[in-house]
Image (spheres, rainbow, N blue to C red):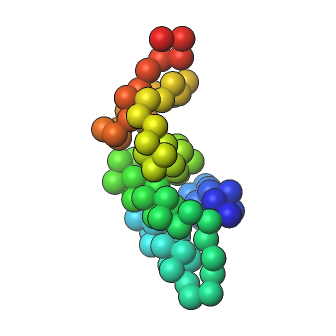
Amino acid sequence: SVVAIAEMVWVMESEYRLSRPDIRKHILSITNTPGVQIESKELVAQAVDWYVLKNIDFVDAYNIAWMVSQGIETAYPFDRRHFSRVSDIDVKVPGQ
């Protein structure tokens, strides 16, 4: 599941102190392992790319990838910092 992938990213980042590019490499290795089924594999791949290239937390990157895949163009996150790094999303302050 995507939750398991997010947990793996967190453990590699916080416990093993791996670099983001190394984490990306490991996550993509897992998602491309024959016989392993990954929920929303394409979204996980996009999220892990943005996690590295745009310095976005993995969970935020996954949520943005999901929004883009659903045609959702506006987000109202409390932490605008990460969402504003993807040009496909118009970021608004909650309450606007």
Quarter of the rendering containing residue 92: top left
- Residue at 51% of width from left, 80% of height from top? 32
- Residue at 48% of width from left, 29% of height from top? 75
Asked whether residue 92 is in view, the answer is yes
Residue toward you, 82 or 41: 41
- Residue at 30% of width from left, 38% of height from top? 87
| Residue farthest to the left, as pictured | 87
Asked whether residue 56 is in view, the answer is no
Residue toward you, 12 or 66: 66
Instruction: Please state the horizontal and vertical placement of residue 26, each as a whole percent of the image.
Output: 51, 73
Instruction: Please state the horizontal and vertical placement of residue 16, each as a whole percent of the image.
Output: 60, 64
| Residue farthest to the front, as pictured | 71
| Residue farthest to the bottom, as pictured | 34
Quarter of the rendering containing residue 86: top left
- Residue at 45% of width from left, 50% of height from top? 69
Up/down of 71 relative to 84, above or below: below
Instruction: Please state the horizontal and vertical placement of residue 25, each as a whole percent of the image.
Output: 45, 72
Q: How many marks?
A: 0
Instruction: Please state the horizontal and vertical placement of residue 20, each as a whole percent of the image.
Output: 44, 60
Up/down of 92 relative to 46, above or below: above
Up/down of 53 relative to 89, above or below: below
- Image quarter where the N terminus lies is bottom right
| Residue farthest to the top, as pictured | 95
